Image (cartoon, rainbow, N blue to C red):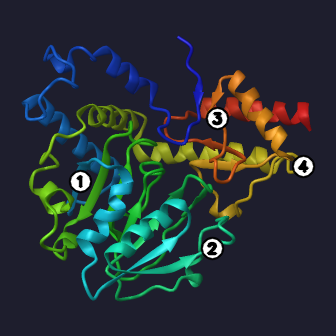
Amino acid sequence: MARVHNYFAGPAALPLEALKAAQEELLDFRGTGMSVMEISHRSKEFDELHNETISLFKELSGLGDNFKVLLLQGGASLQFAMVPMNFLSEGKSADYILTGAWSKKAIKEAKILGNTRVAGTTEKDGIFSSIPKQEDLDLDNNAVYCHVTSNNTIFGTQWRSFPDTGSVPLVGDMSSDILSRRFDTSRFGVIYAGAQKNLGPSGVTIVAIREDMMEKANEGLLTLLNYKTHIDKNSLFNTPPCFAIYMVNLSLKWVKERGGLDAMEKENNEKAKLIYGTIDGNKDFFRCPIEPESRSFMNVVFRLPNEDLEKKFIEDGKNAGFIGLKGHRSVGGIRVSIYNANTLDSVKDVVEFMKNFATSNG
């Protein structure tokens, strides 16, 4: 079996151990004689898997008992609408910090539903090369919430520490760096993340909601778009994405077996240091357009001296077994996505490829 180095930004690499575990019980899930894709979501076996997945996520992420965890569908994109629909009421306002393409989409949806302020941005000519500093934010102390996108996959920026919003709860789209590092979850009223980068395959979105946020939630909402519906039914109001939840379960077990969040953070820091060190150590050939203090530890973006060399880098990389190195179509360049499942050994290999390419083509 020929496995490649998968550096796609999402759907992205999954832990090999999780894939092998799924392979082994694909036809017989936990002794049922059926695949998890065939079993009823109302069965005892799936119910155990479902609750185990929620419990594992809460344990690994450090969420308090005052959080409800939901396993929903629709990706983070649906959460762009569900968050303001549930919490942004008439006469109230919400702050959004604009740091990239995905926060821009979140703002667009929120503006349809209520009064929304852009409390800060570093956008220049459509480009985001840094995260706003605290002193550059125009925060509303009376806002219902302040929305941040923790990591920006397209532009390669990441909040190293989250803004101080006082008593205003943060709402975080953490689709691309969830479970990659430890942070203070108590400051967040809502955390949501599409699974397809650090948690599992596409098809399921994890949403964690602090109980006091739900006390202020709007009434009279459409049933399926009401968080209370899913809390009351433990995310089983409608048929869940069973296989995706199963793969999240296996991926969470993999994280736990490797030492949990602290071990993930340590390795992710080492991986980022390796790649950025290679870029900064050869500035005549590699150039990172992101300010150092804002660089993403999940999506490393950089440029080469010209586009022809970038195309050659991508093609040579593919031939060498490094897949998904092409930057997002809106910005071009190179992007190396180093999520949890992209191991340190794999990153060492891609760094060696970078050095050899620079030597041969510099």
Where is 213 relative to 286, above or below?
A: below
Q: Residues within 10 Å of mark 2 (few under 14, many from 20)?
A: some
Local crowd size for mark 3, using a 10 Å CA cut-off: few (<14), some (14–19), many (≥20)? many
What element does badge 1 sit on? strand
Of badges 2 and 3, the one in the foreground is 2
Which of label 2 and label 4 is nearer to you?
A: 2
**Label 1 vs label 3: CA separation?**
32 Å
87 up-or-down from 21: above or below:
below
Q: Residues within 10 Å of mark 1 (few under 14, many from 20)?
A: many
Look at the numbered disc 2 and give the secondary structure of its residue.
Answer: loop
Answer with the quarter of the image where residue 326 lies.
top right
What label does residue 347 carry, if any? 3
CA distance separating discs 1 and 2: 32 Å
Depth check, mark 3 against mark 4: the one in front is: 4
Q: Where residue 333 sits in the image (x, y, percent)?
A: 72, 47
Q: Which residue is mark 2?
A: 122
Residue at the outermost front position: 112
Residues under labels 2 and 4: Cα distance?
27 Å
